[in-house]
Amino acid sequence: MSMHPTLRTGSKIKAKRNVLKRYERVDILKKRRKRKDEDSVYGLPKTQLEG
């Protein structure tokens, strides 16, 4: 049985995501020095992708 085309992954052009996962937002805030390790991971401020 063949795989449905929507389930395939590969080297196709990837769309830019405008929603980040929590760990991605935490990483960005750490880089910008707006978050400490002991801060809560809930209620994070909105962040924009760099790039």
Image (cartoon, helix red, strand yellow):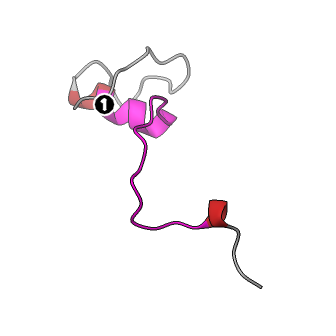
Q: Is residue 11 left or right of residue 6?
A: left
Give the magenta range.
8-28
Q: Is residue 48 above or below residue 27?
A: above
Number of labels in the image equals 1
Query: Is residue 17 or residue 44 the one in the foreground?
Result: 17
Query: Is residue 31 or residue 12 the one in the foreground?
Result: 12
> Going by the picture, which residue comes out furthest to the bottom?
1
Query: Is residue 2 or residue 42 the one in the foreground?
Result: 2
Quadrant containing the C terminus in the rendered view: top left
Residue 24, how many percent across, how many down?
40, 37
**Residue at 33% across / 36% down in the picture?**
27
Q: Is residue 34 above or below residue 25?
A: above
Q: Which residue is mark 1?
A: 28
Residue 43, how many percent across, how many down?
54, 16
Quadrant containing the N terminus in the rendered view: bottom right
Q: Secondary structure at mark 1?
A: helix
For the residue marked with disc 1, what is the amino acid? Ile
Residue 44, how many percent across, how many down?
47, 18
What type of secondary structure mainly makes up the magenta span? loop
Q: Is residue 8 above or below residue 20?
A: below
Is 19 inside the magenta-drawn segment?
Answer: yes
Binning the other alpha carbons within 10 Å of mark 1 as few (below 14), some (14 to 19) or many (20 upward) gives: some
> Going by the picture, which residue comes out furthest to the right?
1
Is 31 inside the magenta-drawn segment?
Answer: no
**Residue at 50% across / 37% down in the picture?**
21
Residue 9, how many percent across, how many down?
52, 66
The image quarter containing residue 39 is: top left
**Residue at 64% across / 59% down in the picture?**
6
Q: Is residue 35 left or right of residue 45?
A: left
Query: Is residue 20 or residue 28 the one in the foreground?
Result: 20
